[in-house]
Amino acid sequence: MKFKTFSAFVGPSVIMMLLFIAAPLVSVFVQSFYLTQPIFETVEVETCTPGFLTQTCVTELKTKPILDDNGKIITQTEFVGLQSYQNVLELDRVGDAFSSGRLGDILTIDFWKALRFTLTFTLITLPIALVVGLGVAVAVDSAVKALRGPIIFISLLPFIITPVIGALAIRWLFIGDGIMTAFLENWLQRDISMFAQGWTIELLMLFYRVWHVAPFAFVVFYAGLQTVNKDTLESAIVDGASRIERLRYVIIPHLMPLIVFVALIHLMDSYRVFEEVIGFSSQAHVISLQWLTYDFLAPDDSGNRSISRASASAMLTMIGIVLLLMPLVRKTWRDHKGGES
């Protein structure tokens, strides 16, 4: 292929990636080293009580932001180096927790609390989603052809639903006098409050994530099953291999590239968990790294946003995603090089 033809096809994609991926990442990285704050001034403010003869006035010093000619707050930006990362990680409190032996205090720090849930959420839902998706794919592939279409359609419904809507639907089933809460209370003969404690909320969020993403794994694996060599399966049956042995030694090795692909997609998506935190309103008990970045960007009472800390949190989140993906990417690269040789 000529270079001009190659450039005509690849050039627009490269330009879009530079504009909408590379440039924002560089901007966030740079902003994490700078702190933008309003400029304040101290002024004397006289406050008088109502009345005429008994009126008393008190003069006190108050701090307020300086406004420009248009009434907007004047800000200043200064280079702070790694201070924003320090503010997010709160390493001094982490050191105090280690020195005093109270390691549980680390999880009271927002970043480490969010990191704990994000890793737990990602690493628990990954194998469950893979197993459920593969199990459904094998079951559908073994079902009667007339039933495969309806089963596939029903199985895809959780994946089609908008994530926030799906999270809200699960929440409404269990919150207050929801249908599932009422059923459990009648069955167990006791009052149940699924949203009064953190661990029950986490269970619901884990259940929802598997329910939502397993259909994607099912579709990918089901498509892969259609390419399994039938002669190899028949030979395994003739040799007396059981269903479990055929699954272990024939089907899973054949689907391994697809399993790695689904794992990569799931890791990237789950590590950026955000919809579940919003849908389940779990901020009082459970937060994620993505939600923490969003919270830093939310304006405070004076309208200021912690853009520097939000940028630092976003960069730390991205570093975490890269570290999680590295083993799978290395495996994919080794398999690719092995296939070439």
Image: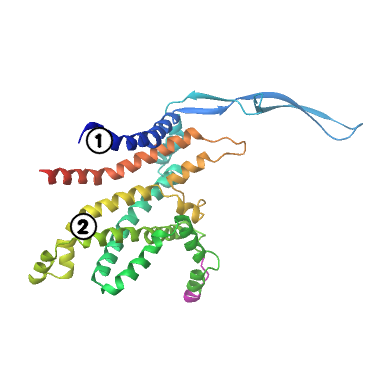
Q: Where is the C terminus found, in terms of image quarters?
A: top left
Instruction: Judge depth for marks 2 and 1 and give the one in front.
Output: 1
Amino acid at circle 2:
Leu
Task: State how many labels appear.
Answer: 2
Residue 109, can we see it?
no
Q: Position of 326 compared to 19: left or right?
A: left
Q: Position of 338 compared to 9: left or right?
A: left
* Residue that mark 1 sits on: 6
The crowd level at tag 2 (other Cα within 10 Å; few <14, some 14-19, many 20+) is many
- Above/below status of 281 relative to 59: below
Q: Where is the N terminus found, in terms of image quarters?
A: top left
- Above/below status of 203 relative to 303: below
Please report the residue visible at 33 percent of the width from the left and 38 percent of the height from the top.
13
Percent of width and height locating residue 131: 28, 61
Percent of width and height locating residue 29: 40, 31
Q: Secondary structure at mark 1?
A: helix
Residue 147 falls inside the magenta stretch: no
Percent of width and height locating residue 299: 57, 39
Please report the residue visible at 47 percent of the width from the left and 63 percent of the height from the top.
170
Q: Position of 25 compared to 305: left or right?
A: left
Q: Residue furthest right?
A: 53
In front of the other: 271 or 227: 227
* Residue that mark 2 sits on: 255
In front of the other: 316 or 163: 163
The magenta segment is: 186-192
Percent of width and height locating residue 191: 53, 70
Residue 256: quarter of image: bottom left
